Amino acid sequence: MVETCSNNKEFRREWTVYDWCRPGTSVIYNQLIRVGDWTEPTFTENSTTITTSYSADECAGVVSISRGHATDNCGSSFIDITVYRDTLASIDNEIAFAAMNDNGSYSAVVGSEGVTGKVSDDGSISLEHLPSGSYLVRWVVRDDCGNRDRKHNRKRSSLGNCRATR
């Protein structure tokens, strides 16, 4: 038996068919049986908020992103948050990422391009030093067995224009 995660099991059953009319002749068939959780968790639509504030004099903004809510049919669900620059979801435009750990909280927020992040007491993430522009926030829900919500709930947000000269 192979255990692929705590809720999934795979095992092989071997069947031997004997031909009694031809002694010594047999055929072996293998059957792979999979039992487990292959259903993606469900992300609750409209369970997320994005709050922004922006200083035109400093050319930087602060964004607070709630983690949202998700459920899974037979285990825990985890919500990862990714923020992209210019509303285009590609690895080249990724400026912040937060992965939920096993106890259901974010332990760190990884930022790039001068963006810093922290985890708030309410479980939301806060990003600081975001330059003006448009952003795309993506919540991806996963479970203990690696199933993912493939709908990728997305919200767009923009920060104001810069007044300072540099």
Image: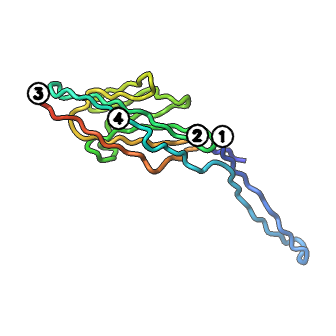
* Nearer-N-terminus badge (1/3): 1
Q: Are marks 1 and 2 in contact (CB under 8 Å)?
A: yes
Q: Amino acid at mark 4?
A: Ile
Residue 115 position within the rendered picture, expressed as x and y whole percent measured from the top left = 29, 29
Q: Quadrant of the C terminus?
A: top left
> Residue 164: which numbered mark, if any?
3
Mark 1 to mark 2: distance in Å?
Answer: 8 Å
Residue drawn at (63%, 48%) of the image:
37
- Quarter residue 84 falls in: top left
Gap in angstroms between the C-alphas marked 1 and 3: 55 Å
Q: Earlier in the sequence, mark 1 or mark 4?
A: 1
Neighbor class of circle 4 (other Cα within 10 Å; few <14, some 14-19, many 20+) is: some
Residue receiving disc 4: 50
State how far apart marks 1 and 4 are (Cα).
34 Å
Rendered image: mark on residue 144: 2
Which amino acid lies under the numbered mark 2 shown in the image of this protein?
A: Asp
Asked which secondary structure carries label 1, the reply is loop
Question: How is the rendered protein coloured?
Answer: rainbow
- The residue furthest front is 46
